[in-house]
Image (cartoon, grey):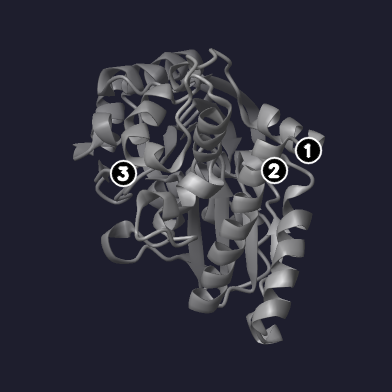
């Protein structure tokens, strides 16, 4: 069995073909179709028409509150404005004439690791997806934990610092590329509109800008991405260092809270940022300092590991959700 799989992110869409042995046949990228539900469906249909003779169906990984049984998207995430309260399975299956499955992206990451990845040898684990935003999933007794309103693992909305209960306390602002990009644009006076997810950055600027300096000059039309951010970090750029320090402290708070709430045998880091070689060693160093200063007992120390599938984990998890829905 093979599926055409899609992982819809805030800045791009990964897609490819995965088989029922967790083998990724190929993968590629497209721009994120954030403008309309029609554009979203057409992105899928355009690729399905190329590969329909090679696959048995379509599997989708989506940010937001997703009911994988009914197919409804209940809001939140980058596609909320175009998909909220729409039945994604119906939209896609009717347009393509194909069996379709959909699952939340963080839960896809967790499913892939529990299937054949870094959690395959334990009963309880958690996955933290760090990319454009922040997502995750929790595995309890070898099964995905969905929770009330399918919201278990929505780590994006956890508070990772305290600034008076504002949006600036949330994990996605402090740990996702979109949040890090926003901060650096404000510190360096870069134009928000030219960035990936520029519309999202401009929208949240109304809520976030009070915490950042006002520049007299017009913003520079310089586009940055994750690679540029970590290049600046390596070079010791003070603004990037400040943003990275906030990232590390937020990561420690989130990881510690996951560990104390769920007691997973492992916490796996996946998503685009998992490809940054220094990331997990830096987080572990920060965790070590935190444990020492706060006298946290060894039984509550997190076992942090890198995803086996890195930023492709959601593609494999989407395949698993398809098999779970339709059988092998």
Q: Which residue is mark 2?
A: 241
* Quarter the N terminus occupies: top right
> Dividing the picture into quarters, in which one does residue 93 lie?
top left
178 shown above or below 69:
above
Give the residue drawn at x 45%, y 57%.
Answer: 155
Can see residue 83?
yes
Task: Tell me how far mark 1 sits from mark 2, CA to CA.
Answer: 6 Å
Disc number placed over residue 236 in the picture, else none: 1
- Residue 174 at x, y = what percent? 52, 48
Q: Choose mark 1 or mark 3, whichever is in front.
A: 1
Give the residue drawn at x 50%, y 31%.
Answer: 186
Q: Nearer the viewer, residue 38 or 155?
A: 155
166 shown above or below 237:
below
Q: Is residue 50 left or right of residue 27?
A: left
Q: Secondary structure at mark 3?
A: loop
- The residue furthest front is 216
Q: Nearer the viewer, residue 253 or 120?
A: 253
Q: Nearer the viewer, residue 101 or 297?
A: 297
State the count of labels. 3
Q: Is residue 103 left or right of residue 76?
A: right
Q: Which residue is mark 3?
A: 76
- Residue 175 at x, y = what percent? 55, 48
Task: First in sequence, mark 1 or 2: give its number.
Answer: 1
Can see residue 79?
no
> Dividing the picture into quarters, in which one does residue 184 lie?
top right
Task: First in sequence, mark 3 or 2: give its number.
Answer: 3
Q: Crowding at label 3, few (<14), some or many (≥20) Cα neighbours within 10 Å?
A: some
Give the residue drawn at x 69%, y 27%.
Answer: 228
């Amino acid at each position: 069995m093979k599926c055409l799989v899609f992982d819809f992110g805030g800045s791009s869409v990964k897609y490819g073909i995965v088989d029922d042995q967790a083998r990724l046949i190929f993968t590629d990228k497209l721009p994120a179709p954030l403008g309309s539900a029609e554009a979203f469906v057409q992105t899928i249909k355009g690729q399905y028409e190329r590969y329909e003779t090679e696959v048995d169906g379509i599997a989708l990984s989506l940010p937001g509150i997703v009911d994988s049984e009914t197919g409804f998207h209940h809001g939140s995430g980058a596609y909320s404005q175009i998909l909220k309260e729409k039945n994604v399975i119906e939209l896609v299956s009717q347009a393509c004439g194909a069996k379709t499955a959909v699952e939340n992206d963080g839960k896809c990451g967790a499913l892939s690791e529990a299937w054949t990845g870094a959690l395959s040898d334990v009963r309880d684990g958690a996955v933290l997806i760090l990319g454009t935003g922040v997502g995750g999933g929790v595995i309890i007794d070898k099964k995905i934990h969905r929770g009330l309103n399918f919201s278990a693992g929505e780590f994006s909305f956890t508070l990772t610092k305290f600034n008076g209960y504002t949006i600036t306390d949330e994990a996605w602002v402090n740990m996702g590329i979109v949040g890090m990009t926003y901060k650096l644009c404000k510190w360096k006076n870069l134009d928000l509109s030219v960035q990936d997810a520029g519309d999202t950055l401009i929208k949240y600027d109304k809520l976030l800008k009070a915490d950042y300096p006002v520049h007299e000059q017009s913003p520079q039309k310089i586009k940055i991405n994750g690679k540029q951010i970590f290049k600046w970090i390596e070079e010791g750029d003070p603004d990037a260092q400040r943003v990275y320090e906030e990232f590390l402290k937020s990561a420690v708070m989130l990881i510690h809270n996951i560990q104390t709430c769920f007691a997973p045998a492992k916490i796996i880091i996946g998503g685009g940022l998992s490809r940054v070689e220094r990331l997990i060693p830096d987080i572990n160093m920060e965790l070590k300092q935190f444990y020492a200063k706060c006298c946290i007992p060894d039984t509550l120390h997190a076992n942090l590991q890198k995803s086996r599938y890195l930023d492709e984990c959601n593609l494999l998890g989407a395949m698993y959700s398809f098999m779970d829905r339709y059988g092998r």
